[in-house]
Amino acid sequence: MGLLVGDLVEEAAAAAPRVLAATMRDRTVTFAELDAETNRVAHTLAGLGLGRGDVLSWWTDTTMDALAAMLACARLGAIFAPLPPVATPAEVKDVIGYVDPRLLVVDAPRREAAAELAVPLRTVGTGGPDDLLELARSAAAAPVHSGVTETDPHIMYLTSGSTGTPKGVLVSHRATWLRSIAGGGRFSGDRGVLCSFPLHHYGGWAFVVDAWLHRTTVHLVPRADAEHLHAALALRRPSAMYCIPAVWERVLAAPGDLSCLTHADTGTSRISSNLVERIRSRARNATTSVLYGSSEAGPMAGLHPWQFADRPGSVGRPVPPGVMALAGDNEILFRGPTVMNGYFGRPDATEEALDSDGWYHSGDVGECDDDGFFTIVGRKREIIRSGGEWVSPAEVEEALRCLPEIADVAVVGLPDEQWGEIVCAVVVPALGVLAPDVAALRTRLDGIARFKHPRRIVTVESIPRTSATGQIQRTRLRTEVLTGHP
């Protein structure tokens, strides 16, 4: 039997047709309903010319409509490429130029901006004649057969390199299946998992697929804020929830009952013992694990609840069937069947990330003790990872240089317990002008997504640069900021 993502819901529908596959607020869909809707959407997309190897770009807020679309692409052998809802029109234009999709699907708030792009367009949630799901209502619900294989890519997660140029992480059907098997084990009880990630993110789809693999429900929320998460907790009483540290801080700062949870997990960065204890005190019936992974490799390591006391700060041991190692410069390497196929259309970047022996070079610098437990100590590359999102310093610097009160600027990542890293702008003010404060600056950066905005500003007289090329000496600058001697 091939490990095909499109089969997940079909098999669940045969085994448990009336079980809820997904919820969002008051909306629900069973496995049987989702299976039939997926087939109708697949037939509709095929009629629009989408086939094996073609790309469908999806640019909407978090919506249950994305579930059938992703599955339909998987059944057709097409590649589903979700875009961040917070991406600006300029950023989406760059992505569309890179990905060259056969079709772009947007919701009402993005329809006007998308109309300016030179790409075939359909909508969702508009009810109009170009609404994909309205078109699918009259399509056949018969199964779709496309000859797709388990090594074909079915999804593309967009990330950025050091220059801000987008890279599409291509993940195969087989890798997605095995990622869910490797990262599973956090489901006890039948009340499903509350997904705190948006559906453009690997984390979002990982929990969707994990739930379906265990034939239970994924509960979606419009936004990962305290209001929506607590509302879903109260309404659905899920068994499991995973949040990055910054989101857990929001949840813990607000009143609400977490006693329904049997798994209250976290990860993506070094986790403080204090946060774990506060999670445990609120989610008193839950165990807490730390999970470490990436879009390129899936789950890489995990720390179990009984290991916290002796391994504070560790991300645990490698998750089977993968293995981890340290390179000569202490970069964490990972190898296994969950690793991506490569970066879409970027063989140079693929060659840099995946060596000839199949090792994925994570860019994280780590340590490993005698018992095989890994700890993350920093980043090899300049790219910043904040709240599970990748931020290019060069891209943020370009946006900041447009502000008249800034003469020079450099962007570095600073360690932060909530976000993993935060974006810090080191600024040389223009002559006779005060540098803007963080709040004022963030209101003027409409050209880049909000997660890329600086959360701290440091004022200096000059930016340290190399004498020969004028490149920013980021390591030196970051050290100076951290020690308070810029």
Image (cartoon, helix red, strand yellow):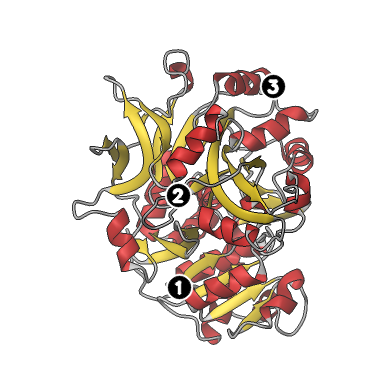
Secondary structure at badge 2 equals loop
- Real-space Cα separation, disc 2 to disc 3, in angstroms: 48 Å
Does residue 188 appear in this view?
Answer: no
Q: Which residue is mark 2?
A: 465
Q: Residue at x 45, y 80 (%)?
A: 51
Q: Is residue 436 visible?
A: yes
Q: Residue at point 73% right, 40% down? A: 229
Image quadrant in which you'd find residue 486: top right
* The disc label shown at residue 78, or none: 1
Instruction: Determine which residue is flagged by label 3.
Output: 282
Q: Nearer the viewer, residue 211 or 380?
A: 380
- Which is nearer the eye, 256 or 273? 273
Going by the image, does 107 lie left or right of 105?
right
Mark 1 and 3 residues: CB-CB less than 8 Å, in contact? Answer: no
Question: Dot 3: what SS?
Answer: helix
Sequence-wise, the earlier of marks 1 and 3 is 1
Q: Which amino acid is tagged 2?
A: Arg
Mark 3 closeness class: few <14, some 14–19, many ≥20 residues within 10 Å: some
Mark 1 lies on a secondary structure that is loop
- N-term mark: 2 or 1: 1
Q: Nearer the viewer, residue 16 or 174?
A: 174
